[in-house]
Image: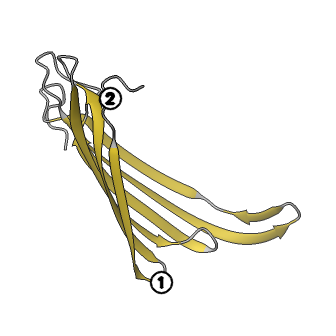
Amino acid sequence: MDDNGSKTLTARSIVEVTPGMVVGGSLALRDAPGTDGDGERATGWEVDLEVGDWAAGPHLVVALAGGENWRAPGDDGVVPDFLAAQGLLTWHRPVDLGPVTGIEPLLRLSLVDPRRGSPATPGCW
């Protein structure tokens, strides 16, 4: 919902370092409602690494994201930072079992601190 006439800007870039390895990153300037009702900007960023693909064998995706958590301002109006990390590891093995063409176990790990640097989360990250 647009509440102040401002826009959100987002940019993303990826680079194929070697065949099967991609590094990416993004930056966002989010149109966020301010504590006084005026629009403000909240900044977010992300970097990621992808090794392998979904076709066969191992596939690893790891990402780190951070920025200003404009949805969780403190009582004093200060917007805390957030930091999140996620990793996915899959292994696709083709099989020939009629309609089943592959088996792909998945391991996923996610960590997040939505109020980084806030007294509400002492000792996180």
Residue 65 located left or right of residue 106: left
Picture quadrant of residue 77: top left
Observer-nearest residue: 99 or 22?
22
Measured from the top left, where is residue 58 in percent x and y? 54, 71
From the image, tell me which residue sits under label 1. Answer: 19
Q: Which mark is residue 101?
A: none
Q: Residue at x 47, y 83 (%)?
A: 19
The answer to which of 10 and 98 lies nearer the viewer is 10
- Marks 2 and 1, how far apart in space? 43 Å
Secondary structure under badge 1?
loop
Question: In the orientation shown, which residue stands out farthest toward the front?
Answer: 5
**Element carrying mark 2:** loop
Give amino acid for label 1: Pro
Seen in the picture, residue 29 relative to 62 is either above or below; the reply is: above
Relative vertical location of residue 62 with respect to residue 120 in this rendering, above or below: below
Q: Quadrant of the C terminus?
A: top left
| Residue 7 percent coordinates (x, y) | 33, 38
Is residue 108 shown to the viewer in this render? yes
> How crowded is the residue under tag 2: few (<14 C-alpha within 10 Å), some, or many (20+)?
few
Which residue in the protein does label 2 denote?
5
| Of the image marks 2 and 1, the number of the one nearer the N terminus | 2
Q: Contact, CB < 8 Å: mark 2 with mark 1?
A: no
Picture coordinates of residue 5, whole percent (x, y)? 32, 29
Q: Does residue 104 lie above or below 76 as drawn? A: below
- Residue 48 in view in this figure: no
How far from the left and from the top, in percent, is residue 57? 59, 74
Q: Dot 1: within a 10 Å radius of its alpha carbon, few (fewer than 14), some, or many (20 or more) residues?
A: few
Q: Amino acid at mark 2?
A: Gly
Q: Residue at x 73, y 65 (%)?
A: 102
Residue under the point 35% across and 50% down: 10
